[in-house]
Amino acid sequence: MKKESNPYKMERVTVVKVGGKVVETPELLQKLLFNFSRISGNKVLVHGGGRSATAIAKQLGIETQMVNGRRITDENMLDVVTMVYGGLVNKKIVAGLQALNSNAVGLTGADMDLIRAVKRPVKDIDYGFVGDIRDVSTRELELVLDQGVVPVVAPLTHDGKGQMLNTNADTIAAELAIALSRKYRVQLIYCFEKKGVLFNPDDEDAVIRELDYTSYESYQKSGVIVDGMIPKLDTGFSAIRNGVEMVYITNSDELGSNVGHGTKLII
C-alpha cells in the first residue's frame, strides 16, 4: 500500500541512478553530468560501473563470474569493485561535476554509516560478498544536502563489522529514495542509454509512457521486459509504494527540465 503523502514536505530531492553504457562512455557520461547539474533543487547521484570492473579485473588476471546477469563477488572481485566503484568511477564523476560548478562529494554505504547490509545467504547460488540492504541512515546525508552539496554514491555497502559488500545500484537508489521520502518530496530517475522502457526492443522510439505493475508483469511474462530492466522496475515499483512521489526511467537527454518523456511508473 502506498504511504500517504505529507503536504508539509515541501523541499524536493531528485535521486538519479545512472549505469550501463552511460557510465562507461565518456561522451554519454559528460552529457549526463551536464544535464544532471541543471536539475533544480537538492539531488543525489547513484552510479554503477560493472563494465569498468570487468575490464580492470581482466587486466589483473581475475576471472569475472556472472550468473543470470549478477556478479559473483569473491574476495578478489570485492577488492576490484571496491577500487573501481568507490575510487575510479566515483571520483571521475565527482571531478566531472566539479567542472560543471556542481559541488559534489563521493560516498559509499560505509561513509557516514549511510547503508548497512548483510551478506546474501547462500541458497542455490553463493554470490560471495554481495550485500542485501538492511538499514539506510540519511541523517548525515541530509546535512550534506542542506549545504547544497551533491552526494555521489557508489554501489558499495558495509555490514557494520568491517566488511565491505557489493550491492546492486538500482536497489541502493530506491532505498535511498525511500529513506529520504520521510523528510522530502522525492523523485527517482533511472537513467541509462534507452529512452525508457520499450514495448518493442527493436524500436528505440517504442517507449511505454506509463507503466503499472499489472502491465509490467504481463510484459515480463511475454518476454518484452527482460534482463537488466527487471531490477530497475522491481525496485522502482517498491519505491513508489513506499513514499517516493515519482519514478521515471529515461536517458540522459531527458534529464533536467523535461524528464516526463521517459517511462513513468504508476500504481
Image (cartoon, grey):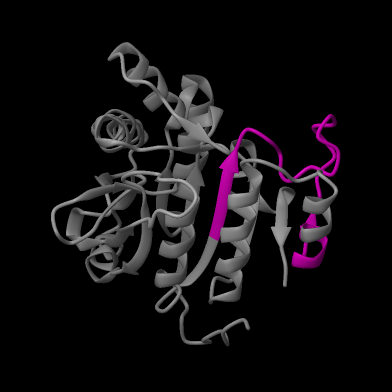
Q: Say if 253 sits above or below 130 in the image.
A: above
Residue at 50%, 21% (x, y): give it: 25
Instruction: Assign the C terminus to one quadrant of the image.
Output: bottom right
Q: Say if 259 sits above or below 82 in the image.
A: below
- State the image coordinates of residue 3 (x, y, percent, origin top left): 57, 84
Residue in the foreground of this view, choosing between 84 and 117: 117
State which region is magenta.
Answer: 188-216
Secondary structure mainly formed by the magenta segment: loop
Residue at 30%, 68% (x, y): give it: 138
Q: Does the magenta stretch include residue 20?
A: no
Circle count: 0
In this orientation, does residue 177 appear? yes
- State the image coordinates of residue 24 (x, y, percent, origin top left): 47, 24
Q: Is residue 202 left or right of residue 162?
A: right
Q: Does the magenta stretch include residue 198?
A: yes
Q: In this view, does 150 lie to the left or right of 68?
A: left
- State the image coordinates of residue 232 (x, y, percent, origin top left): 59, 51
Residue in the foreground of this view, choosing between 112 and 16: 112
- State the image coordinates of residue 173 (x, y, percent, origin top left): 45, 55
